[in-house]
Amino acid sequence: MQVLLWLWVLFPGCCTTIAVVTQTDANAVMGPERVTGPEGGSVSVMCHYGKGYEEFPKFWCRNNLVLCLGSHIIETTRPEAEVRQDRFSIQDNHAQCTITVSMGTLTMADTGTYLCGINKPLDFDPSHAVDLLVSPGPRPAASISCSWSA
């Protein structure tokens, strides 16, 4: 559906179907606007979603120019089960209506905007943008030794 919306925006009139985003979907996922973590460290992000979205898969992706376009970094596969993949994990808590995502071994290249969202097949995916800022980690101290003889 996101593809149709972008096609319509880029090429008006090319598509007869347009995605209509309801106010409910627009506010379906909420969370922090920005998180900061140290290089080499980790961050956890908790997003909240509204009732009625419990049974849909949840995802975390890097936001590119055209949203995620199906390139989810990690996605829930079973209700309530934590999914781990490489340096990422995601868990959906139905009772609290929360999505918790963790990223480990952060690098400066991880700095950017990510989306915490709900995968609604063949429909608009409600999501929330989170800016991740990775701060430089401590650098190893330099040691200089000089030999001098008279």
Image (cartoon, grey):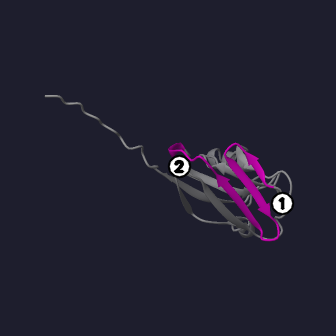
Residue at the image point whose x is 54% and y is 50% from the top: 112
Decide if residue 95 is on the left or right side of residue 137: right
Instruction: Tell me, yes or no, if residue 6 can be seen here.
Output: yes
Image coordinates of residue 143 in percent, x first then y, are: 34, 39
- Residue placed under numbered mark 1 in the picture: 80
- Residue placed under numbered mark 2 in the picture: 111
Residue at the image point whose x is 66% and y is 55% from the top: 102
What is the secondary structure assignment of the residue under circle 2?
Answer: loop
- Residue type at mark 1? Glu
The mark that comes first in sequence, 2 or 1, is: 1
Decide if residue 35 is on the left or right side of residue 61: left
What is the secondary structure assignment of the residue under circle 1?
Answer: loop
Magenta segment, which residues? 82-109
Residue at the image point whose x is 83% and y is 60% from the top: 80
- Residue type at mark 2? Thr
Q: CA distance from mark 2 to mark 1?
A: 28 Å
Q: Quadrant of the C terminus?
A: top left
Asked if the stretch drawn in magenta spans residue 99, the answer is: yes
Of badges 2 and 1, the one in the foreground is 1
Residue at the image point whose x is 73% and y is 61% from the top: 99
Q: Are marks 2 and 1 in contact (CB under 8 Å)?
A: no
Decide if residue 106 is on the left or right side of residue 15: left
